[in-house]
Image: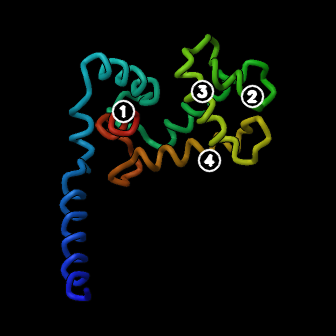
Amino acid sequence: MQPKKIILYPLMAALMLGAWAMVPNSVQQAAAQVTEEDEERFRGRFARIDTNANSVTTRSEYTIYRVSTFNRMDTNANGVLDLPEFRDQGRKPSERRAARRTKSFERIDQNGSGGVEREEWDGYADRRFVRMDADKDNEVSFVEFVAYVK
């Protein structure tokens, strides 16, 4: 039985490496798979963040965007987002969207208080910016943005 194990392990490793090689890892490829309707929606969102319209979003632009987003959602202006403020964002979401937003809310509410404080929101937004910045140049291009939000 020992010789079979020796052959089996390299075969399994080769199969895993082959499967890994087939996974698309290019930000460009992910962005290329966007429909025209999605691209228009993404361009609108990106433009709201890219305040100087230079086709990249900097950390400072993203900070301004996240603060304004928090303030817009905090309808009672108490400095904490509760689940209805976060989930509904001023209008009634579909059941699917409400479920996704509830899960997101629970992830952001790291201390489990039932409310998202500004510190939690800022930490969430910082982690999000870092994940969007695929090439780690402290700027998020439209292609990086689309690959992340898609």
Q: Is residue 1 above or below residue 68?
A: below
In front: label 3 or label 1: 1
2 vs 85, left or right, is left
Callout 2 crowding tier (Cα within 10 Å): few <14, some 14–19, many ≥20: many
Callout 3 crowding tier (Cα within 10 Å): few <14, some 14–19, many ≥20: few
132 vs 89, left or right, is left
| Observer-nearest of 70 and 7 | 7
Residue extending furthest bottom? 2
Residue 150: mark in rendering? 1
Q: Which residue matches tag 2?
A: 82
**Please, what is the three-letter code of the amino acid marked with disc 3?**
Thr
Q: Could you tell me if the residues under marks 3 and 1 are in contact, i.e. CB atoms within 8 Å?
A: no
**Please, what is the three-letter code of the amino acid marked with disc 4?**
Gly
- Of the two numbered discs 4 and 2 on the same chain, state the one appearing first in sequence: 2
User: Could you tell me how far apart the alpha carbons at marks 4 and 2 are, in whole angstroms?
Assistant: 17 Å
16 vs 62, left or right, is left
Q: Could you tell me if the residues under marks 3 and 4 are in contact, i.e. CB atoms within 8 Å?
A: no
